[in-house]
Amino acid sequence: MRKAAAEVFTEAVWQRCYVHFLRNALDYLPRKADNDCLTELRSIYDRRNIDEARQDLVTWLKKWSGRYPKLCDWAETSFEFARRLSAAAQRLSSSFSMSFNAV
């Protein structure tokens, strides 16, 4: 789907929102997985400071990679992209709010 969208909408950027980021994480966890694992991933994603989020991700990967290697591999490749898009969306949202408030 990403490839098809890129071919048709050449200027479009693939964006994974917070909810879909976490839903996709569930694809890499067994049903009886430790809730702490996903809770910690959620809190890392929620961090406002991207440098702190990156540091926390490294710690999280070390903690959980032995138990959930597929999830950790996925998170390591998906996290940065999802966070950058989330931060950009928040900046745009703030800009629109300020624009409408000024009118």
Image (cartoon, rainbow, N blue to C red):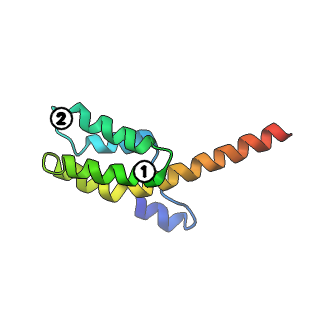
Which quarter of the rendered picture does the N terminus lie within? Answer: bottom left
User: Toward the viewer: 99 or 19?
Assistant: 99
Alpha carbon separation for disc pair 1 and 2: 26 Å
Q: Amino acid at mark 2?
A: Ala
List x then y, in percent, for residue 28. Answer: 22, 46
Q: Secondary structure at mark 2?
A: loop
Q: Amino acid at mark 1?
A: Glu
Q: Secondary structure at mark 1?
A: helix
Residue sitting at 59 percent across and 46 percent down?
90
- Left or right: 71 with respect to 93? left
Q: Please indicate, yes or no, whether residue 1 appears anywhere in the rendered image.
A: no
Q: Please indicate, yes or no, whether residue 56 appears anywhere in the rendered image.
A: yes
Which quarter of the rendered picture does the C terminus lie within? Answer: top right
Q: Residues within 10 Å of mark 2 (few under 14, many from 20)?
A: few
Which residue is outermost to the right?
103
Contact flag, marks 1 and 2 (Cβ < 8 Å): no
List x then y, in percent, for residue 101. Answer: 80, 37
Residue sitting at 67 percent across and 44 percent down?
94
Residue sitting at 18 percent across and 35 percent down?
33
**Label 1 or label 2, whichever comes before in sequence order:** 2
Q: Is residue 68 above or below residue 33?
A: below
User: Toward the viewer: 35 or 9?
Assistant: 35
Q: Is residue 46 above or below residue 54?
A: above
User: Toward the viewer: 55 or 22?
Assistant: 55
Q: Which residue is mark 1?
A: 52
- Left or right: 31 with respect to 76? left
What label does residue 10 carry, if any?
none
Q: Residues within 10 Å of mark 1 (few under 14, many from 20)?
A: few
List x then y, in percent, for residue 8. Answer: 52, 65
Q: Which residue is mark 2?
A: 33
List x then y, in percent, for residue 72. Answer: 24, 52
